Image: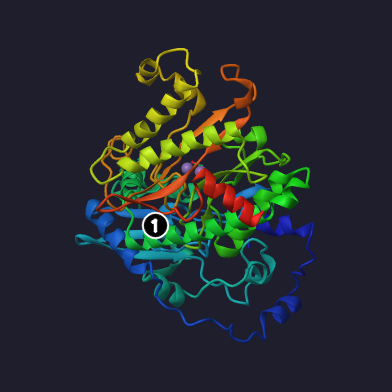
Amino acid sequence: MSDDAISRNENRSTTPHNSAFHGYISGDWGDLPRAVAIQRAQAPFCAERRRALSADFAGHTLVIPAGPILVRSYDTHHPYRPHSAFTYYTGWGDDTVPDSVLVLTPNGNDHDATMFYRFPAGRGTEEFYADADIGEFWVGPRPTPDDVAVELGIVTKSLADLPDVLAHADFNWAIIREADSAITDAVDLARGDSEARDHELAVFQSEQRLIKDAFEISEIRRAIEATALGFDDVLETLPEATAHTRGERLIEGTFNRRARAEGNHVGYETIAAAGAHTCFLHWERNDGPVRDGDLVLMDAGVEVESLYTADITRTFPVNGRFTETQRLVYEAVLEAADAAFAIVKPGIVFRDVHAAAMAVIARHVSDWGFLPVSLDESLSETGQHHRRYMVHGTSHHLGLDVHDCPQARKEFYKDGIVREGMVFTIEPGLYFQVDDLTVPEHFRGIGVRIEDNILVTAAGSENLSIGIPRTADDVEAWVGRLA
Ligand code: GLY
Ligand code: MN
Ligand code: MN
C-alpha cells in the first residue's frame, strides 16, 4: 500500500501495523466460494471486433486502458465505470477491475490480446486489509486470473508486469489517450512524446462502433426494456411527487432506483423536468416541484451491466390530461418524430433525418405565427429562425455511450450514409421558455421532447422503444392507468 494511502487512512482508521496483528489477520482463511467461470456471451463478438482492429493496425502495439477510479474529493470517489473503448474490445463491463489495461501485441498479421489487471493480492498482504481503495477486505474480492481468462477469452497477466511492458513503447505503439493519463504518460515517455497513431486509433474504434453487432443490439433492447419499467415506476409515484416540494427529485430517484436494480446505473444524468423546467434541454438539477397542470419531461436511460444504454424521453401531463395548447405542441413534435422515422432506411444520409424533423417543426411554428420571416426563408441556411424553439439536433448514435461514436469523422457520422445495424435516437422537441416574448403567453413554459431509439434494418427501421406510450392519447391513458 502506498504511504499516501496509509496516511489518508490514519485519521479515520485504527488499523494496527504491528507484526503480531499482521500475522494474526493474515492466517486461517479458507477458500472463497466462487462460481464456476464460463465464457461470457459477448466474448466471441469482442474477439471479432479485435480482429477488425488488428487488420487496420498491423505491426502496431495497441494499448486500451479501462481507466482509474476517479476521485470525487480527497478519499471519496465516483462510481467506477471503465472507458467504453476498453469494454468494447474486452466485454468487461460493470465488474471491471479498475486500472485494467488491454494490450494487443502484433503477432504476424494478427495480434495477441493480453489483459493486465490487478490480481487478487492474497490475505497475507497489507493491501488486503488496510487499503480502503482496493483492498479486498474493503471493496470485495477480485476475480482470479483463470476466471477472467475464461470469461473474457483473453490471456491475463498481473498489472505489476505492465510498467516493464510499457517501457518498451516506441513509435509503433498507439493508445486510447483519454482513458488513463498515467498509462498515457508512461507510453509517451517511452516513445518520446510522439502521439503516433493515437488519433487514428480513437477514430477507428468510434467508427467501428457505428454498426452494432447482434450482441450490442440485444443489450440495447435490454436497456430499453429496463428503461420502460423505470418510466412506469415514475408514473406510479406521481401522487407522491406532487405532494413533495422537490417532486422532480422523487421522479429522478424513482427512475434511478430501477436503473440500479435492473442494470449498472443510469447511462447519463436523469432529466426530470416539470412545468417551465421542461424548456431547459438538460435540466439535471431536478429540484423543482411537480404540480397539477404541469407537463413532466423525463429524459432517462438505464445502462445495463454490459454498459449499453437506452436514451428515452417522454413528456406527460401530471394530471393525465394535456391542455389544448400542450396537446397542440405535443402533436407537432410527434409529427416531426414520425416524419423523421418515415425516411429511415439503409442508404439515406444521416443528416436528412434531422432535416425531415425540422421541416415539420418549422412549418408548425410558422403556422402559429412565431417566425419573423417566411417558412422558406427560415428553412434556408441563412435563416433557421425556427431553431430558436429547438436548438438541439434530432439524432445521435447510441450504444456504450449515450452520445456514441463521437470521434467518428463527419463523413461517416453526420454526413454519412445510414446503414443496417446502426442504432440512433430520434428526438425532436419544442421549447417555449417562460420569458420568450416571441410566442403568445399560453405557449410560454411548455417544453415537449419525444425521444425514441431506432435500429436500422435491411428493410427500413425498427423503433426499439415503441412499447413506451408516445401518442398523446396513449400517454394520457398511461398516466391514467398508473398514476
Ligand atoms: N439525454 C441526452 C440526449 O438525449 O441526448
Ligand atoms: Mn435523451
Ligand atoms: Mn438523446
Q: Which residue is mark 1?
A: 88
Residue type of the residue flagged with mark 1: Tyr
Do we see residue 256 in this rendering? no
User: Relative to the observer, which residue lies in front, 59 or 399?
Assistant: 399
Rendering coords of residue 358 (x, y %) = 40, 30
Residue 202 in percent (x, y) is at 36, 45
Q: Secondary structure at mark 1?
A: helix
Which residue is nearer to you in this view: 350 or 201?
350
Residue 376 placement: quadrant? top left
Taking depth in this image into account, of 449 and 91 the one nearest to the observer is 449
Q: Is residue 236 above or below residue 247?
A: below
Identify the image's colour scheme: rainbow, by chain, secondary structure or one colour. rainbow
Query: Measured from the top left, where is residue 469 in percent x and y?
Result: 51, 51
Q: Quadrant of residue 69?
A: bottom right
Picture quadrant where residue 273 is located: top right
What is the x, y in percent for residue 305? 50, 63
Quadrant that contains the N terminus: bottom right
Q: Does any atom of ligand 3 lie closer than 8 Å to the CB of label 1?
A: no
From the viewer's perspective, is residue 24 above or below residue 259? below
Question: Residue at (52%, 73%) from the top-left corner?
Answer: 143
Seen at 63% across and 21% down, the residue is 441
Mark 1 is surrounded, within 10 Å at the Cα level, by few (under 14), some (14 to 19) or many (20 or more) other residues, namely many
The residue located at (33%, 48%) in the rendering is 210
Farthest residue, direction left: 109
Q: Is residue 59 visible?
A: yes
Q: How many marks?
A: 1
